[in-house]
Amino acid sequence: MGESIEIYLDGMEELRRNFSKLRVSAPGVVRLAVNETAIKARQDLYEKADSTYKVKKTKFNKSLKITKASNSTLTAIISTKGRPLALAAFDYRRHTKSGRATKPVQLGEPGHRAFVARMPNPNGADHLGIFVRVKGTQMKDKPKKEQIREFFGSGVPVMIGGERVYGSLQGQIEDQLKYALRRHAERVIRSMEG
């Protein structure tokens, strides 16, 4: 499952005609504006996703990939794919010394207390997750303990694909592209004058 956002400029032929009168390369200016907008859009997507879902930046940015525009394509693509993120990839509160979180959240069935644990991984970095014991089951290697189940939140494609994140930023991204294009065009024109 994946989502992608394309950032490009409509009306490229009209822009080329206007720039050819000035003897300026339109694709070079558009490429700079599109790439700058794509980088800013990724940052805005994270900020909106963080305010909506409280996701941590490293986990969010790790699943986003920017394919930058070139002079021939003039389209930047922000693509994402991935599975649901472990609940530890979101902001959470551990239990205090008294045994209660400041605002307890019910995870799983009533009567089960969730806990944060670091699971060893022989092939790489350990995995931090939020787990709960499943009543009526047994661990294979420790029969006196119940099995555990990890909780997962939304994946990044689900977060940015909805109206709550990308839908609310679409107009802002278009405005940023227009502003960046104007700024880069003015910079090129100033460099030609002086």
Image (cartoon, grey):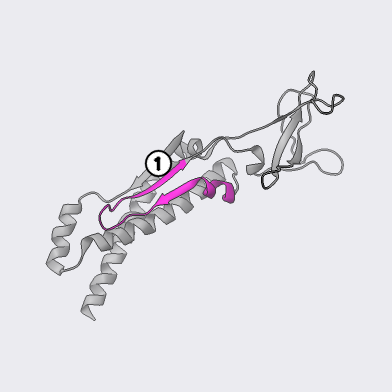
Q: Give the range drawn in magenta.
A: 57-80
| Residue 43 relative to residue 179: left or right | right
Q: Which residue is at 42% across, 51% downward?
A: 66
Q: In the rendered view, would you say 12 is above or below 141?
A: below
Q: Which residue is at 23% across, 72% downward?
A: 189
- Location of residue 116 (image quadrant): top right
The verdict on residue 65 being magenta is: yes
| Residue 97 relative to residue 31: left or right | right
Q: In the rendered view, would you say 168 is above or below 178?
A: above
Mark 1 lies on a secondary structure that is: strand
Q: Which residue is at 53% across, 48% downward?
A: 62
Residue lying furthest bottom: 194
> In the depicted view, which residue is nearer to us: 151 or 165?
151
- Location of residue 123 (image quadrant): top right
- Tell me where residue 72 appears, x and y as whole percent: 25, 55
| Residue 93 relative to residue 19: left or right | right
- Tell me where residue 27 appears, x and y as whole percent: 24, 59
Q: Which residue is at 43% across, 38% downward?
A: 3
User: Label 1, on which residue?
Assistant: 4
